[in-house]
Image: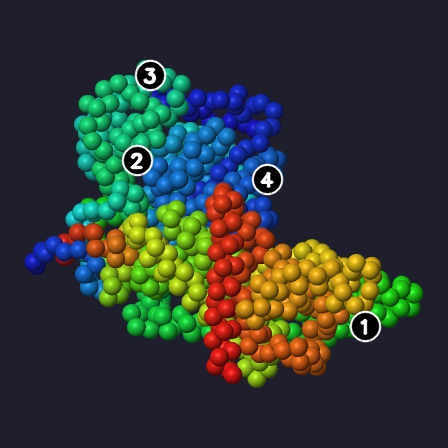
Amino acid sequence: MEHTLSTLDTGMVGRSYTIEALSLPLKIEKRLEALGMTKGTPVVVMNNKSAGTLIIKVRGTRLAIGKGISANIQVRS
Amino acid sequence: MTQQEEEPVTGCEVQQQTENGADSAPKTLTVAFIGNPNCGKTTLFNAYTGANLKVANWPGVTVEKVEGFVMNHGVSIHLVDLPGTYSLTSYTMEEQVSRNFILSDEVDVIVDVVDASALERNLYLTLQLLELGKPVVMALNMMDIVEKRGMEIDLHRLPEMLGIPVIPVSALKRRGLSVLMHAVIHHKDHVHPDRLIHNHSDKSMHKHNHHSEFAMVYSDFLEDKIDQIKNHLRVRYPDLGNHRWVALKLLDQDADVMKRFPIHDEDTLVDRSYETEIINQKYDFIEEIIGEVVVNRVEKVAATDYADKILTNRWFSIPIFLLIMGVVFFLTFFIGDYLKTFFEQGIDMLSGLAKMGLESIDAGEMLTSLVVDGIIAGVGGILTFLPNICILFLSLAFLEDSGYMPRVAFIMDDIMGRLGLSGRAFIPMILGFGCSVPAVMASRALENKHDRYKTMLVTPFMSCSARLPIYILFSGMFFPQHSMITAYSLYVIGILVALIALFAMNIIDRSHQENALLIELPEYKRPSSHTIGIYVWEKVKDYLSRAGTIIFAASIVMWFILNFGPDGYSGDMANSFGAWLGQLLVPIFAPVGLGYWQITVSLLAGISAKEVVVSSFAVLYDGLNINSTAAVSALAVTMGQSGFTALNAYCMMLFSLLYIPCAATLATIHSESNSWRWTAFSACFQIGVAWIVTFAVFQIGRIILN
């Protein structure tokens, strides 16, 4: 299996990704971390509107995140 | 109160007992409810206190701390419901407020309300609470959902792993309430965990066996650091109860704690933030707990996934949303109007009876007029709209409790993003269809102050339930064939004006900030009849009390200023104080098609509450029977003769939609912004927008129609 790095906003529906790094304003980063989105956490993309607004599932929780966030989350597929 | 058992002295952390403990005179026990957003805290709080605080299925419904008192097992208990939170960091104001409150001496016991159906996420907050060094009891809510999904939670193992009592409750079905409070009372002095049994495979080289002391034990590396910092803290702050928590927060480089408890050698001990490690290790432990405690774990919750495939679909989501709002509107108008006829007959009868009664006791013309033409016409006229209001709130309650609301934030995120806001700002706007007051308050859920103010400014443009009577009256009067589509157009215009205003603000204000959407999407659920019942009843009560107070008073005031003039009581309204006041405003309102003193005086009165526009109208036209179709169409003809056409009527509705919603909304804007300047600006902005839009419609309409 090939490992490729990308940002989460390009994530495909139904696929699972692993978080590599967050590069967001501190406040948002901390909120995401509190929700368990730390490095190495698997994320499943449930829905992806063309603009990068996503529904993801992390540690059993469904979250809606905007493009501003998803484009700044590096993931490994 | 008897102490359950003596705590083994572990020698590490001894919580300073500020009060002289259990055997003093009965003291009120303060219990704080804390938990993730949308975990059922408020439902639990309501179940205990009998309060009817609003509950819905989206995160962020409770925005401020609420208190109540109960007696349980002979102990007086002070309950505090805190806004939901995922963590106890100090990055947001709300979290800091909640954290400082539960850390204060005021709180005796923390009740951690946990959504059993989302145990993994909820336990993160639990682990943080356990570190505070306060007695914690877990209320495991929503066990019925867990059972329904065919899962099981090992209620024997969970307390062993956490070291706190775990009480299964059903807030909605009011089960386990007494047991939970009993545990709270017994546990109020237990600052140390109960017996902990962990089966960790890795061998620790750390010198203490923390696994018997703390539920959450970190790696040897972190534990060594914690010990070192604790030694410093013990010297410098010997009275501090929870050294371990402060040490952890220093390792987190928590700004608030670093400021309050500086230590020597901070730079060498805390060379960087260890927050990520601390979070990761907590989640590792959570995974361990889940693995042991949750039986039959289902990864996929098929129903919600399936519903989301349709409701949040890339192409269909917006049409479906519009369709849903259309159905809400249709129900409100169509079914509401059908039920309204029964109310009208009732008010008609009452009016007739009152008139007969008053005449039979020779009450005199003036008093009869006050009661029949003033109070019954004004207040009664408003009461007939109750069915419409009821259905509107019933529909909104259904949307809120089903879990659809946060999806709307997702659906609207693209559009709102172009206007410089996150999709989350759309939630207060939808709530604005119900009532502007809670809608303005709901804007608090937006983290960014900038966004909050923008949202507060445009939320009153959403057509609230109090404007409904105006639409029903005027569209019925002047657009009898197309009354529903006329009213619907006003709802749409309200949304459009709000969006255009946001668009304009986004262009003017170029200080671009991060407005990224981040919201949890709960599972869909069948709305609870109990929750909806409370919701609708609260709104109906509110409506009735407004009818009994503001509208009642406004009707009397209107009757006075319309029936009294410089010459005292007279039946000639054209010569009354009201007419004089209205005439003053006529020049301003003539360009927007509303240059009639009757209209201007009603609009002025409508600032007290929007329904008053209609009740004033009833008083104005001498006890006009709003409830009789014949009387209303006769009035339309009369008004038509004075040049007030359908276009003027539409302008009237439009202006009512857009100008200051009501005094209560202004008061809310003031309390939320804490600024008179902003409140005044907001009021002027709304009047200005109302005038400009109505002006454009009236002038263009006139050109087209002529």
Kind of element beneath mark 4: strand
Q: Which-is-in-front pick, marks 1 and 4?
A: 1
Distance from the alpha carbon under mark 1 to that under mark 4: 47 Å
Residue with the most extreme top position: B235
Q: Which residue is mark 1?
A: B352
Q: Give B130 or B144, whichever is nearer the viewer.
A: B130
Chain identity of mark 2: B
Disc assigned to residue B216: 2
Q: Is the same chain shared between marks 1 and 3?
A: yes
Report, in whole angstroms, how far the alpha carbon at label 3 lies from the one at label 2.
25 Å
In what element is the residue under mark 3? helix
Q: Mark 1 or 4 closer to N-term?
A: 4
Return the x and y of residue B342 as percentages of the image width and height. Answer: 69, 75
Say if mark 3 contacts mark 2, CB within 8 Å.
Answer: no
Tell me, yes or no, whether dots 4 and 3 are on the same chain.
yes
Circle nearer the viewer, 4 or 3: 3
Q: CA distance from mark 1 to mark 2?
A: 74 Å
The quarter of the picture where the N terminus of chain B appears is top right
Choose the circle earlier in sequence order: 4 or 3.
Answer: 4
Give the residue type at disc 2: Met
* Residues marked 1 and 4 touching at CB (< 8 Å): no
Left or right: residue B611 versus residue B440 is: right
> Which residue is drawn at the image coordinates 59% and 34% (left, top)?
B75
Q: For the residue labelled by badge 1, is the local secondary structure a helix, a strand or a loop?
A: helix
Quadrant in the picture for residue B594 = bottom right
Q: For the residue marked with disc 1, what is the amino acid?
A: Gly
Q: Which residue is mark 3?
A: B236
Residue A55 drawn at (x, y percent): 29, 60
Q: Which residue is mark 4?
A: B69
Can residue B6 be seen from the camera position used here? yes
